[in-house]
Image (spheres, grey):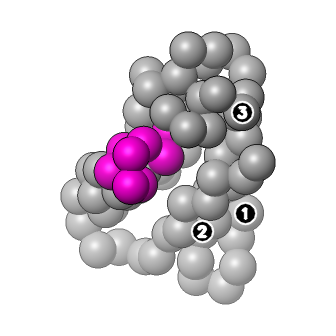
Amino acid sequence: MDLLEPLEFLVKSACKEPELVKINEKFEGKKTIYEIFASDEDIGQIIGKNGRTIKSINLLLRTLKKGNGEFELKVIR
């Protein structure tokens, strides 16, 4: 399953300026890496207090993925 679309929806939903959100998808072997770019203020929103928001997004995506392949989320400042 392609996670780019649900990831984009979840990240943009947490942002005040969703139009500035950009997500790059990179492949390293069997692993997919999603690089998330946003405004400085929105980076804090995406990560959340003690990383709770990004951990929740990660959990939701892992549930959608159902164990088929590996992925990693990277929030880039």
Tag nearer the camera, 3 or 2: 3
- Tell me residue 23's x, y (percent): 68, 42
Q: Quickly name the residue at label 3.
A: 40
Q: Is residue 57 visible?
A: no
Residue 42 occupies quadrant:
top right
Dot placed on the residue nearer the N-terminal end, 3 or 2 = 2
Query: Is disc 2 in contact with disc 1, using a CB cutoff of under 8 Å?
Result: yes
Image coords of residue 44 (percent x, y)? 56, 38
Magenta-highlighted residues: 46-53
Is 54 positioned to the left or the right of 41 in the image? left
Please tell me the numbered disc located at residue 32.
2
Locate residue 45, reporting x and y percent.
50, 33
Disc marking residue 26: 1
Q: Main secondary structure of the magenta part?
A: helix
Q: Is residue 49 magenta?
A: yes
Q: Is residue 40 above or below residue 13?
A: below
**Nearer-N-terminus badge (3/1):** 1
